[in-house]
Image (cartoon, rainbow, N blue to C red):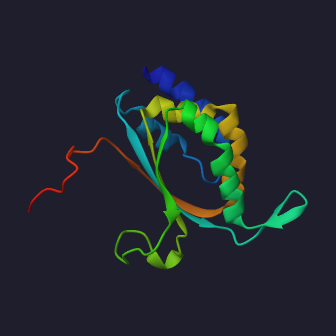
Amino acid sequence: MRAEDIDEKIARLVDLHHDDIVAPRAEDWRVILRLEPDQPIVIVNLLCFKASIPYNAETIAGATAHARYMSEVAEPFNRAGGQLIFSGGVMHMFPDAGVDASEGWESAVITRYPGPEALADMWLDPGFVRAHRHHETGVERSRVVVLKRPRMRSSRPPSL
């Protein structure tokens, strides 16, 4: 992808999601979109949900809003070639893992995308934009780690 095309796509992404507290910033997109086009991307997302939120005419748990997001985002996620690797509760975190374990992370979601453009195009998909409001509404805070191509291809751990 040419530098001008990257800048144009980033401008569209930031313009569309500028007030979203759980969206990548321009500098995040710049790193992602400069990866090799066929570079698979794995994203680890730690989540903590709001206890309760006003939602239309009712009050619901933030986790409920996020469940709605997960349901509604399925179609744009599949169109992007995304794969859900893991979605579930966080049992424990080591206190020195670089993230404050006392913050009370409730959920982890690990996803894989075929490349940087697939990820960005999903974020531009109108279905994703509609679904993402549930994520933004229900999430108190999140930490996102973007991983690139693994060094090991074996399913067995290396011997020490």
> Where residue 52 appears, x then y in whole percent?
75, 70
- Residue 19 seen: no
In the rendered view of the protein, which quadrant contains the C terminus? Answer: bottom left
Q: How many labels were placed on the picture?
A: 0
Q: Quadrant of residue 96?
A: bottom left
Task: Identify the residue at image location x=66%, y=53%.
Answer: 135
Residue 17 in the image: state x and y as whole percent.
Answer: 66, 42
Residue 76 in sight: yes
Q: In front here: 136 or 40?
A: 40
Left or right position of 140 against 8: right
Relative placement, left or right, of 29 versus 98 is: right
The residue at the point 20 percent across, 46 percent down is: 152
Q: Is residue 58 left or right of residue 109?
A: right
Q: Residue at x 42, y 32 (%)?
A: 115
- Residue that appears at 35% across and 33% down: 39
**Displayed quadrant of residue 18:** top right
Residue 13 percent across, percent down from the top left: 60, 35
In this view, the residue farthest toward the left is 160
**Residue pushed farthest front?**
155
Q: Where, by quadrant of the figure, is residue 139 drawn?
A: bottom right
- Asked if residue 79 lies left or right of residue 96, the reply is right
Q: Quadrant of the N terminus?
A: top left
Q: Relative to residue 37, is residue 142 depicted above or below?
A: below
Q: Nearer the viewer, residue 32 or 8?
A: 32
**Front residue (pair 40, 6):** 40
Query: Percent position (x, y) of residue 32?
Result: 43, 38
